[in-house]
Image (cartoon, rainbow, N blue to C red):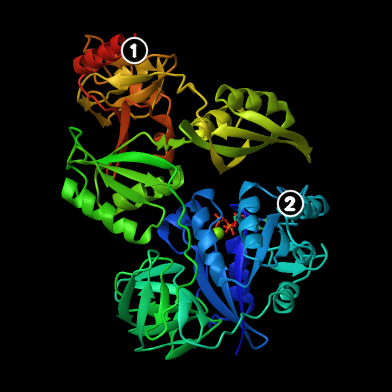
Amino acid sequence: MNIRNIAIIAHVDHGKTTLVDKILHSTNIFRDNQETGDLIMDNNDLERERGITIFSKNVSVTYKDVKINVIDTPGHSDFGGEVERVLKMADGVLLLVDAFEGPMPQTRFVLQKALQLGLKPIVVINKVDKENCRPDEVHDAVFELFFNLDATEEQLDFPTIYGSSKQGWMNTSITPTDNIVPLMDAILEFVPEPKINEGATQMQITSLDYSAFLGRIAIGKVARGSVKEGQNIVMIQADGKQVKSKVRELYTFEALGKKKATEVFAGDICAVVGLESFNIGDTICDVETPEALPVISVDEPTMSMMFSINNSPFFGREGKFVTSRHLRDRLMKETEKNLALRVEDTDGADSFLVFGRGILHLGILIETMRREGFELTVGNPQVLVKEIDGKKCEPYENLVVDVPAEFSGKVIDLVTQRKGEMTIMESKGEMQHLEFEIPSRGLIGLRSTMLTGTAGEAVMAHRLLEYRPWKGVIPGRNNGVLLSKNTEKTTGYSIDKLQDRGRFFVDPGDEVYAGQIIAEHIKPGDLNVNATEPKKLTNHRASGSDDASKAAPKILMTLEECMEYIQQDECIEVTPKSIRMRKVILDENERNRVSKNMKAEAI
Ligand SMILES: Nc1nc2c(ncn2[C@@H]2O[C@H](COP(=O)(O)OP(=O)(O)OP(=O)(O)O)[C@@H](O)[C@H]2O)c(=O)[nH]1
Ligand SMILES: [Mg+2]
């Protein structure tokens, strides 16, 4: 059978998953009575809630008797390494670009990877239904990007399709149609058939899947020969070590699922069950002639966070898994499938240092763990500093901000305070397009300040550039916090009294403990407050006013917002039901003593 293998790549939110959904629908893979919601591809709970793709996924459709394996990839930069790996299964890519936003930092990254692999992209200018979109300008910008990334003559001669994945149409011009046929035809025309190499079995594992029944499943494209059910094979690992194993079961991708196969030939993508302890990048080989494919580089972590057991006074109230043993086992298990993650033991038996690719990457792990019933404490995220040529270096990122012109001064101000330097400023429709180079440290906590500073109008994206020399002190959070003096239920009476001191993170009636961060101070400096005072009884009857109702609603912060909010001496208590920010040292006197000592040492 004729095969095409394509990966869909783009910046976050440019419409990849929506397009894959439309491809599935248009090829009629659903039975008439089958219920099909939107974004069937983002099928994991967290993906649905956040509306983003976290894991790349394989599906397959048949169009004009050709089997098309489609790989949907995540667009968020924290998962860029995943895209790079799965591109190894593709013989062509659809590069989606939002017809308004144009190329963004992650567009550049994924395109660069595709070009380096010698793939010839089909450019899809998506979302041309959007008001104010600028498909022609965006097309020019994409061409320029290809050019800047040293595309070959052939790659520069890319075909372009315009359309709206949301409305379900694609065309070779911006004139709407009622189907995606022009795109499907372009795939058949421009994506080369996979190379069919005859010879002994060779297949590199580029991705993995889990099944409660089958265990870990290895996914990759058969590069040479074929893989057979029951075949004895050798896996060659990155360090050259060879491990014998056996293909227990074999599957190819069909529609949204997998179909059992007895033999899969070079060029097709398949899933292998039964391999013990494989790693991404291992080559599955014939036993007689084991030959490895080039090693896949796994992305280095850029950020670390301390994970410890929960030691707050509310320990054990809400979670099932609370011991350091639970925590360690869970983290170690995660490293089996979460490639960019690294876990190190520390001097303390209850704490582990976890390294990841960014706030979202680590945040999703923590969120997954709390849903499984874990309680834990996490510290503030730290970027990884490296010594290069004897110099202390830190990661730098390319930051892109699109904002209405009236706010651009404010944005430049905020970024420069955090040691960012502007490299580009141009207008894009009615928006101002700003680009900066900024230490990753400076980005932590920037999003919320930026949104507050621009009335929620700023759209920002960033992507790792490289390590550069350490840029010196970057100011942390401006405001201090209000800390609870005692462990009790807060009262509407006291919160009401404290309203002009800070903006609260808790509601009247919430239980808090001493040392918990219950509000943001309106000024710099921390304040210990009593938020649990009951209303004084007087001889007068209450006038019917309820103090609780006067308090402003609490500020709701997501886990990742909390991660960006806390400072060095603070941490977050995470349980299945609650996320609380607190001081590492809960006792007020102890805290004061330590901070005095620290100040003394600094002098
Ligand atoms: N107006 C318009 N909106 C679209 C179009 N395609 C997708 N969207 C919307 O854009 C948002 C993101 O779409 P997704 O398909 O999830 O984007 P994605 O590229 O898969 O995003 P990640 O997987 O997170 O990188 C959703 O709200 C879609 O409804 C389009 O053609 N026009
Ligand atoms: Mg997606």
What kind of residue is marked 1? Ala
Q: Position of residue 361 (x, y in %)?
A: 43, 49
Which residue is the site of mark 2? Answer: 145
Quadrant where the C terminus sits is top left
Element type where label 1 sits in the image: helix
Residue 377 placement (x, y as % from top left): 27, 38
At 79% from the left and 63% from the top, the residue drawn is 153
Residue 68: give x, y in percent of width and height: 60, 79
Relative to residue 485, is residue 339 depicted above or below?
A: below
Which circle's residue, 1 or 2, is located before the other in the chain?
Answer: 2
Between 207 and 517, the residue placed more toward the observer is 207
Q: Nearer the viewer, residue 174 or 335?
A: 335
Mark 2 nearby-residue class (10 Å; few <14, some 14–19, many ≥20): some
Would residue 290 be found to the left or right of residue 24 on screen? Answer: left
* The N terminus - image quarter: bottom right
Is 363 placed left or right of 256 in the picture? left
Residue 216, position in %: x, y?
A: 33, 71
Residue at the disc numbered 1: 602
Query: Residue 357, relative to residue 424: is it above or below?
Result: below
Q: Is residue 597 visible?
A: yes
